[in-house]
Image (cartoon, rainbow, N blue to C red):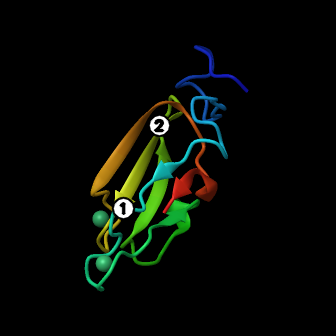
Amino acid sequence: MVCSAETAGITAVCCDSHDVDSGQDEIDLSAIDANRAPEGDQAFVFIADPAHYTGDWTGVVWQTTAANCIATLNVSIDGDNAAEMQIYMSHPYQFTAGDFIL
Ligand SMILES: [Ca+2]
Ligand SMILES: [Ca+2]
């Protein structure tokens, strides 16, 4: 499905984008320590279903999607579900764990 003026912002149906090539382009977060408490460099975890996630948000990466399908990546490095870092995408995209170097 391709985003159009008819679908953007009107329906909850989101669209594919080839802006990021799944399996080709990766977002590299590996240089960021996901958890400051333990020694060393902990890796992030991508949560595909943040609405139903009830665990600790330390070191969690998740996507939120606006009504116009534009994706935002959220990164938390502490226990609450507020993002300490956000990456705004310019186009619709559905991230999967394979899009990252965590
Ligand atoms: Ca650490
Ligand atoms: Ca947080």
Residue 39 in the image: above or below residue 65:
below
- Residue 97 locus on image (x, y percent): 60, 58
Name the residue at 54% across, 63% down.
Answer: 47
Name the residue at 56% across, 23% down.
Answer: 8
Q: Secondary structure at mark 2?
A: loop
- Confirm or reject: label 2 Cβ below 8 Å from ligand 2: no
Marks 2 and 1, Cα distance to the nearest angstrom?
Answer: 28 Å
Residue 26 in the image: above or below residue 66:
below
- Can you tell which of label 2 and label 1 is closer to the viewer? 1
Q: Nearer the viewer, residue 11 or 89?
A: 89
Q: Nearer the viewer, residue 38 or 59?
A: 38
Q: Which mark is residue 66?
A: 2
Q: Residue furthest top?
A: 5
Q: Residue furthest right?
A: 1
Badge 2: residue crowd in 10 Å (few <14, some 14–19, many ≥20): some
Q: Secondary structure at mark 1?
A: loop
Q: Amino acid at mark 2?
A: Ala
Mark 1 or mark 2, which is nearer the start of the sequence?
1
- Residue 30 locus on image (x, y percent): 42, 62
Q: Which residue is mark 1?
A: 31
Ligand 2 placement by image quarter: bottom left
Q: Amino acid at mark 1?
A: Ala
Q: Nearer the viewer, residue 62 or 36?
A: 36
Residue 29 in the image: above or below residue 52:
above
Name the residue at 54% across, 67% down.
Answer: 52
In this figure, what is the number of numbered marks? 2
